Image: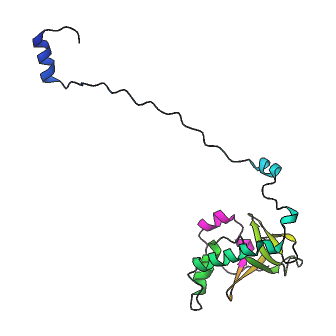
Amino acid sequence: MPKKKAEAIQDILTRKAVVLEHYSQKKKKPKRKKPKGFTAKQRREMRLFEIEPEQQRYAIFLPLHELWKQYIRDLCHGLKPDAQPHMLQGKLLKADLHGAIVTVTKSKCPSYVGITGIILQEFKHVFKIITKEDKLKVVPKLNNVFSLEIDGFISYIYGSKFQLRASERSAKKFKLKGTIDL
């Protein structure tokens, strides 16, 4: 403190608050940049979503189907016979279908009708299904009707209304509309 007269110091101390310690400002930490994921081109080059031919066997994916059945039973609280069908249908629409056994029941293209298998991958416009003959089929959702069977409860899914990614579909609110002619 610079030298001041005792009266001046006393005057300062009685009228103002005196800070005894000096607090330095907190240093701001530099923000870390979050690592970004791969671009679509990088994913294609790395073949991230391709299933190798030796892994394309129906028997390999049966445990996935068992896990999916358990997931649906937990989601629908046991699939009791007295359950309301429209409630189960609503939950199935938002559920993840990876591992479900589906059958194409109606289609504009007759070659798709009757394809049955486990859904391995779901994209915005197509399902990748592995059949019992160990063949990987790519079935478009547009203009197809799929059926799911869980513990005797059969549900039909109109692919034209289902053209969303699984993550987007779980948050979507579906509206009741009339049936669609193929």
Which residue occupies the foreground of this view, 150 or 64? 64
On screen, 64 above or below 18?
below
Looking at the rendering, the stretch of residues picked out in magenta corresponds to 157-182
Query: The N terminus is located in which quarter?
Result: top left
Q: Residue at x 85, y 61 (%)?
A: 52
Please indicate whether residue 33 sits to the left or right of residue 103 in the image: left
Name the side, left or right, on which 88 lies relative to 132: left
Q: Is residue 69 above or below residue 7?
A: below
Residue 4 seen: yes
Q: Is residue 181 magenta?
A: yes
- Image check: 151 left or right of 83? right
Q: Residue at x 86, y 76 (%)?
A: 112
- Residue 139, percent from left and from top: 82, 70
Q: Is residue 176 visible?
A: no
Decide which of 82, 46 is in the foreground and name it.
46
Residue 50 coordinates in the image, percent (x, y): 82, 59
